[in-house]
Image (cartoon, helix red, strand yellow):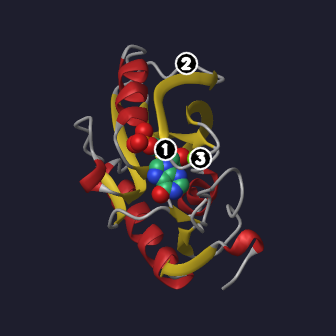
Amino acid sequence: MAVAGQAKLKVLIRRAAIQKRVREVAQQITKDFKGERVHIIGVLKGACIFLSDLVREISLDTSIDFIAVSSYGKGKQSSGQVRVLKDLDSSIEGLNVVLVEDILDTGVTLSYLIRVLQQRRPKVLHIAALLDKPSRRIKEVKAHYVGFTIPNEFVVGYGLDYAERYRNLKDVCVLSLPPE
Ligand code: IMP
Ligand code: MG
């Protein structure tokens, strides 16, 4: 599909496959925390669509919060520096926390967030990432729940952006930009 500026989008994971996998991940979370409450924390903004589909498939007592961090500028490359732009609204002490991310790439963002959140003494801290690009890892991070492991391609859609665009695509697509 051709879009403005001749960027090209190629479907990598279709909507139906995403829906099926999100349901499976939610079932696993439901099983892992059977009979308990889970506190779901979404990393803004990329995780918002994954989180909203995921929570509706979790059959547990659930609460939701969000945290926003910056690591990427407008482009495809990480600046390598993470900072909290919007903190959680409430304490996570003693809670079963599932931290929901759109994609685990270099691991810089999640390793930072894990360190920050562990200091607040949750009972459990599990990581759920819709996508995992293990070939790009700089920091050792393992997600408890991974939707799909993908090759080293820049992807957009289902919450993931390029310069804030394409988050609304229903499929996860590989984005190819024309040479500058
Ligand atoms: P990490 O710190 O390198 O693991 O990167 C995590 C963040 O980078 C994610 O939350 C995304 O916002 C962004 N990111 C990494 N890879 C991609 C991609 O392929 N498409 C869109 N955003 C990405
Ligand atoms: Mg992003």
Amino acid tagged 2: Ser
Quadrant placement of the C terminus: bottom right
Element marked by disc 1: loop
The residues bearing labels 1 and 2 have C-alpha atoms spaced at a distance of 32 Å
Element marked by disc 3: loop
The residue singled out by tag 1 in the image is: 77
- Which residue corresponds to the image point at 26% horizontal and 34% vertical from the top-left? 139
- Which residue corresponds to the image point at 30% horizontal and 50% vertical from the top-left? 136
As drawn, the residue found furthest toward the front would be 180
In this rendering, the answer to whether 50 lies above or below 172 is above
The residue singled out by tag 2 in the image is: 91
Mark 1 vs 2, N-terminal side: 1
> Toward the viewer: 8 or 25?
8
The residue singled out by tag 3 in the image is: 75
Instruction: Tell me whether circle 3 and circle 1 mark residues in contact (CB < 8 Å).
Output: yes
> Toward the viewer: 84 or 5?
5
- Which residue corresponds to the image point at 63% horizontal and 51% vertical from the top-left? 48
* Badge number at residue 158: none
Amino acid tagged 1: Gln
Instruction: Tell me whether circle 1 and circle 2 mark residues in contact (CB < 8 Å).
Output: no
> Toward the viewer: 26 or 134?
134
Q: Position of residue 162 (x, y in %)?
A: 63, 55
As drawn, the residue found furthest toward the top would be 119
Q: Position of residue 77 (x, y in %)?
A: 49, 44
